Image (tube, helix red, strand yellow):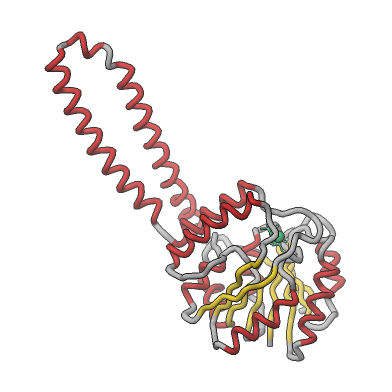
Amino acid sequence: MISVVVPVYNEEKNLPLLMDRMEAALRAMERPYEIVFVDDGSRDRSLEILEGFVGRKGVRVVELTRNYGQHSAIMSGFSIVRGRIVVTLDADLQNPPEEIPGLVRAMEEGSYEVVGTVRVMRQDSLFRKVPSRVVNAMTRRITGVRMTDWGCMLRAYRREVVDRMVESQEYSTFIPALATLYAKRMTEIPVSHADRHGGVSNYTLARLLSLQFDLLTSFSEFPLKVLLYLGTLLAFGGMALGLLLGVLRLWYGPAWAEYGVFTLFAILFFFVGGLFLALGIMGQYVGRIYHEVRKRPRFTIRKVHGE
Ligand code: UDP
Ligand code: MG
């Protein structure tokens, strides 16, 4: 059985066409399937439209209590899937549902545990594509897995991997990276990519940054290490400067020292700025730890329609 999980946040314009295209693609595979839509606290008519799909073959709709974000929404869908192979895709038709059979075939033929995708001719603005390169390189480093495109959510996972991800109970996470912890055999295939069908992207710059920070802090301590090295360097630099100033003061006498006041201010600002930066990075980790220890649920399901 194939399970398809679709997170939905304000996608009323895209749902009818998405449903038809998905149904056609899945029917053509001639095997059991289910479609799990997750309404991530939409404020438009998305939930109403989704409820209208209940009753069509294999459709269930998870209604969350509020907006939890794309990755938590997918995770809530993961928590109720029944299939052996689980496919995720976006609701805005940027990921063509017609790619699902190819994804499943790749997984079964190579007995892979995770099949990622590379968007060929990605239809996004430069404002999205350029930062993506940086994030992809970073993700390759911190996961140690050589995949090209981490941002494309059209992916397939074996059920075992999905179950382990659900068990992980992490509050803020990035699903494609999390999956690498639990899978050994991974591959990626090229898929096509389209412009958003209707509506607008749900990601603002702030949300994108927050997601990247989740990725970095959930999977590495790299920023903390950088702080340690930088701090050590600055401390030694500071000591050297102090020594130099002492020597110069002895050499040039008290008159020389008077003019150093502004230099000292500049140096002080530099160090204080560095301290705040360090505090900020530590604060991010502390905040995330705080989030985790409170053990609030990552998502709360109000109701599963079609159960
Ligand atoms: N999404 C979600 N919750 C959110 C934001 C987005 O479930 O808080 C869903 C959205 O409906 C879509 C997918 O996640 O199915 C990707 O979102 P979007 O297309 O806005 O992101 P982009 O393609 O611009 O990265
Ligand atoms: Mg999109």
Q: Residue furthest front?
A: 121
Instruction: Please name whichever residue, 183 or 249, is drawn nearer the observer in this view of the structure.
Output: 249
Q: Quadrant of residue 245?
A: top left
Which quarter of the frame holds ligand 1? bottom right
Percent of width and height locating residue 229: 30, 47
Q: Residue furthest top?
A: 255
Q: With respect to residue 178, does 296 lie above or below?
A: above
Q: Residue at x 38, y 36 (%)?
A: 274
Q: Residue at x 22, y 14 (%)?
A: 257
206 vs 240, left or right, is right
Whether residue 302 is visible = no
Percent of width and height locating residue 108: 60, 88
In which quadrant is the N terminus drawn? bottom right
254 vs 306, left or right, is left
Q: With respect to residue 140, does 217 lie above or below?
A: above
Q: With respect to residue 266, does 131 lie above or below?
A: below
Percent of width and height locating residue 271: 34, 32
Whether residue 203 is visible = yes
